[in-house]
Image (tube, rainbow, N blue to C red):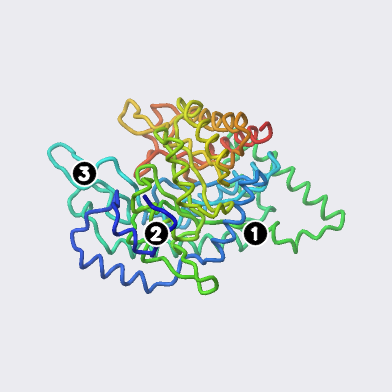
Amino acid sequence: MNTTTTPWSSSSWRSLSALQQPDWPDPEALDVALDRLRTQPPLVFAGEARDLTTQLGSVCDGKAFLLQAGDCAESFDASADSTRDKLRVILQMAVVLTYSAGVPVVKVGRIAGQFAKPRSAPTERMDDVELPSFRGHIVNGHRFDAESRNPDPDRLLTAYNQSASTLNLLRAFTKGGFADLGRVQAWNREFVAESRAGQRYELVASEIERAMRFMEACGVNTTNTPAMHQVDFYTSHEALILPYEEALTRQDSMTGEWYDCSAHMLWIGERTRALDGAHVEFLRGVKNPIGTKIGPSATAADVLGLCETLNPEHIPGRLTLITRMGAELIKDKLPALLEAVREAGHPVVWACDPMHGNTFTAPDGRKTRHFEDILTEIKGFFEAHHTAGTVPGGVHIELTGDQVTECLGGAEEILDTDLSERYETMCDPRLNGRQSVDLAFRVSELLRTD
């Protein structure tokens, strides 16, 4: 078991069992790619990660709310327009939560690095052909052929370059005027104005604009107020491919501490959270804010072990526990974990991932999720926290800005027969923009009554 007294280095994980790693066919090519990554500039900076830890500390205290959202698995083929539309949906959701529930929203994207996916089996079979499973574009291609599915170390470098480009675009959008509160109605006109969720959003946008005009009429200069025109936006991904994460780990020149500079926040998946495993070992030593997924099989001892290993100094905002129980299990499984962590005095952010526990196969064979199941799990999450006297800190959502038809239900009522219209995901089904804004209104109602 990992302990805080065991010496840590960025490579100490290599002595432990590392699950969900590709079987790289050419170790020498892998070493060449990793050597090149080690010489690249950091994608994010230690100070930015520290700022996020501080903001997540406010979430621990119930003074802010975490919105972590983005693609299930990013594509190397994603366009600038797709990135912009995804960001716009997240900003719309944040505006709804902030205005309707009256709390600041910490905005963290599953973006600029979410290229790897854990898989339930190392291979896939189609007819008589068996090939390596698709593990995300950082490892191999999605097409079912031998060349595409062959793990390619050069993809690690492509993932780095793609992340850098996406980060540049995000920084331009969030600091260069796109996130201006004066544009809240423009976001809607461009995207979801025709939908019921969009019409509801339009009312919020109109009220915000009236409030800004009122402040200006009273002599408040909103033009020179940065918070009115730009937002803090952070990146995150699952730290799955450990050689890549190690190669982008840097020692901060100001503090001497180590940071994984591939993203502001990293998380450990449900399949890789073993206390004696390589992923926990790696992330316990970097000072980024980190998260870990918690499924229905987790015991109180499991969760307390993760708290003690990943946040032994009890730093608020350092550790986020992301529950993914499923709509039918959350009320039974979550309360005991909340009680154990509360009694032990661990300052954690509790976030709800209502997506992964609610996946099923539609009649046409496609994986899907139902909007009402997603909402039911979130409601169960809030109810469990209300009973335990703890803070429901945030939600963790898979979404896209594209008008896909991958999840059923929502205000527009996507049906089984609609899935084939625009089912575009490479892995898991995502909420589209209209469903995402609708969900934000539902969550804001739960926040107001909590």
Nearest to viewer (mark 1 / mark 3): 3
Which mark sits nearer the N-terminus, 1 or 3? Answer: 3
Q: Which three-letter amino acid code belongs to the residue tagged 3? A: Thr
User: Is residue 218 in view?
Assistant: yes
Residue at horizontal 74 percent and vertical 61 percent from the top: 225
- Quadrant of image for the C terminus: top right
Q: Quadrant of residue 444?
A: top right
Q: Quadrant of residue 342?
A: top right
The residue pinned by badge 1 equals 230
The spot of residue 238 in percent (x, y) is 41, 51
What label does residue 123 carry, if any? Answer: 3
Relative side of 282 to 388, left or right: left
Which mark sits nearer the N-terminus, 2 or 1? Answer: 2
In whole angstroms, how far apart are the C-alphas of marks 1 and 3? Answer: 45 Å
Q: Secondary structure at mark 3?
A: strand
Residues 177 and 290: in front is 290
Residue at horizontal 56 percent and vertical 47 percent from the top: 90
